[in-house]
Image (cartoon, helix red, strand yellow):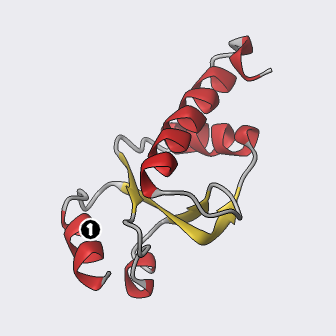
Amino acid sequence: MERESALLLQAVQPASYLVMLDRTGRAMRSEELACLLNHLEEQGKKTLSFVVGGYLGLAPGSLARADLVLSLSAMTFTHEMCRLFLVEQLYRAATINAAVPYHL
């Protein structure tokens, strides 16, 4: 877990806003995620990085590097499913910010 987390963090650009997905993270509604993304854009954040750990999760020490620790659900999913759910939630947030009725 430590080695995998270190390798994942090496791939993150230093100036990137880092979101790590973990079951202990903050749960957000889709509208809250949309608001956060809008706020980050207004702040001039050009790069966001999302880290999804493997089946063991992420090392506790690596979570301290995150700007946000996010939970997609209190339930447990495979990391492959988490990536799919994350992409859908990012798309949903983008449609909310663009006032497109997808999210309704």
Question: Dot 1, how many residues are within 10 Å of its Cα: few (below 14), some (14-19), or many (20+)?
Answer: some
Residue closer to the observer: 82 or 34: 82
- Look at 75% across and 46% down and name the residue there: 29
Above or below for 17 versus 41:
below
Q: Quadrant of the C terminus?
A: top right
Could you tell whether 29 is left or right of 26 in the image? Answer: right
Numbered circles on residues, count: 1
Which kind of residue does numbered mark 1 sit on? Leu
Q: Quadrant of residue 5?
A: bottom left
In the rendered image, the vertical position of residue 50 relative to residue 58, given as above or below: above
Q: Which residue occupies the foreground of this view, 26 or 87?
A: 87
Which residue is located at x 48 percent, y 66 percent?
67
Instruction: Give the quarter of the figure containing the N terminus.
Output: bottom left
Image coords of residue 26 (percent x, y): 67, 65
Q: Which residue sits furthest right?
A: 104
Disc 1, SS: helix
- x then y, percent, for residue 44: 43, 41
Question: What residue appears at the point 44 percent right and 73 percent down from the top-left corner?
Answer: 57
> Quadrant location of residue 12?
bottom left
Q: Nearer the viewer, residue 96 or 83?
A: 83
Give the image location of residue 13, x and y in percent.
23, 56
Q: Is residue 93 above or below residue 7?
A: above
Q: Quadrant of residue 66?
A: bottom left
Position of 63 compared to 71: left or right? left
Q: Which residue is mark 1?
A: 9
